[in-house]
Amino acid sequence: MSRWLLLIVAAVVAIVTLSLHPIPQPLSYHNFADHRRWLAIPNFGDVVSNVPFAIVGLWGLAFIATLKPPNYGNHFADQSERWPYVVVFFGLILTAFGSSYYHLAPDNERLVWDRLPMTIVFMSMVAAIIVERISLRAGLLFWPLLLVRGIASVEQWHYSEVHGHGDLRFYAAVQIYSALVLLLALFLPSKYTHASDFGVVAGFYVVAKILESIDKTIFSVGHIVSGHTLKHIAAAGAGYWILRMLQKRKLVN
């Protein structure tokens, strides 16, 4: 039943996506609130706030690397379950570099390198949930397909922009589906403690999107920090909570 639920959600997201008219990328998207330059780094706040992604990513990889048999059983019932998380943390490191590169001189060409790593993170998290809560075999089999689908959504958006008919629908659908799967995980049986932590991860994601949408409003209050800078910190917080969950959880007897 669980796998059918995920397929139904995927079908609903796909139908809604296809029913919408193409959604172009507004050029105003690249006009972030905080343009301040510091230490010879343009857009300093939005660039440097990507460092937490790298910290969490390296921390997560280091944690998984320290796990040796028989300690795997305290965090992963099967050693294969760790691989989607390895790619999640590696994707966070790539996000730090890709997003920093984009924010140095924001435009559509650089935005590709910001979005590609994020889709790797999103799709690997979906695979991790399938692996843990539905089927190890199915999760590992579908994982490459999920990665291809996520990467293709970015490439499709970029292709549409280059050819003058920008369309964000499919990239947005990947993000929405990933967030919905995180929430659905709360209702799927888990063999681990800290099963509800995926709800916190989804909460960080929602906060990050809200902060992104009020970038200029937040910056207008004292010109201290922008909403987009805080968005990066909140999104990195989601990555940290994934790591925290892995560190603290145990198999349910």
Image: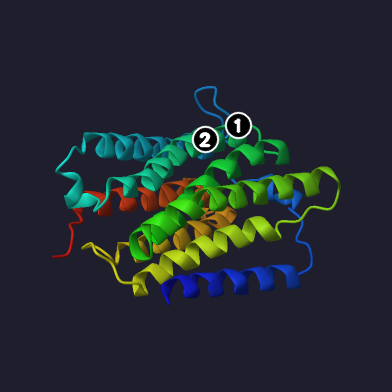
> In the figure, 189 relative to 214: above or below?
below
Residue ID for mark 1: 104
Quarter of the figure with the N terminus: bottom left
Where, by quadrant of the figure, is residue 199 drawn?
bottom left
Amino acid at the residue labelled 1: Leu
Amino acid at the residue labelled 2: Val
Q: Residue at x 59, y 51 (%)?
A: 150
Circle 2 packing at 10 Å, graded few (<14), some (14-19), many (20+), is: many
Quarter of the figure with the C terminus: bottom left
Q: Which residue occupies the extreme top position in the image?
A: 40
Q: Residue at x 46, y 66 (%)?
A: 181
The secondary element bearing badge 1 is classed as helix
Q: Position of residue 60 (x, y in %)?
A: 31, 40
Distance between the alpha carbons at the discs numbered 2 and 1? 7 Å
Left/right of residue 130 with respect to residue 63 in the rendered view: right
Left/right of residue 120 with respect to residue 158 in the rendered view: left
Q: Residue at x 14, y 43 (%)?
A: 70
Left/right of residue 235 with respect to residue 103 in the rendered view: left
Q: Earlier in the sequence, mark 2 or mark 1?
A: 2
Circle 1 packing at 10 Å, graded few (<14), some (14-19), many (20+), is: some
- Along the line of sight, which residue is nearer the eye, 58 or 68? 68
The secondary element bearing badge 2 is classed as helix
Where, by quadrant of the figure, is residue 51 drawn?
top left
Q: Please tell me the numbered disc located at residue 228.
A: none
Q: Position of residue 104 (x, y in %)?
A: 60, 31
- Along the line of sight, which residue is nearer the eye, 165 or 6? 6
The answer to the question of whether label 2 and label 1 lie on touching residues, with beta carbons closer than 8 A, is: yes
Q: Position of residue 16 (x, y in %)?
A: 68, 73
Q: Which residue occupies the extreme front position in the image?
A: 137
Residue ID for mark 2: 47
- Along the line of sight, which residue is nearer the eye, 237 or 189? 189
Q: Position of residue 202 (x, y in %)?
A: 42, 62
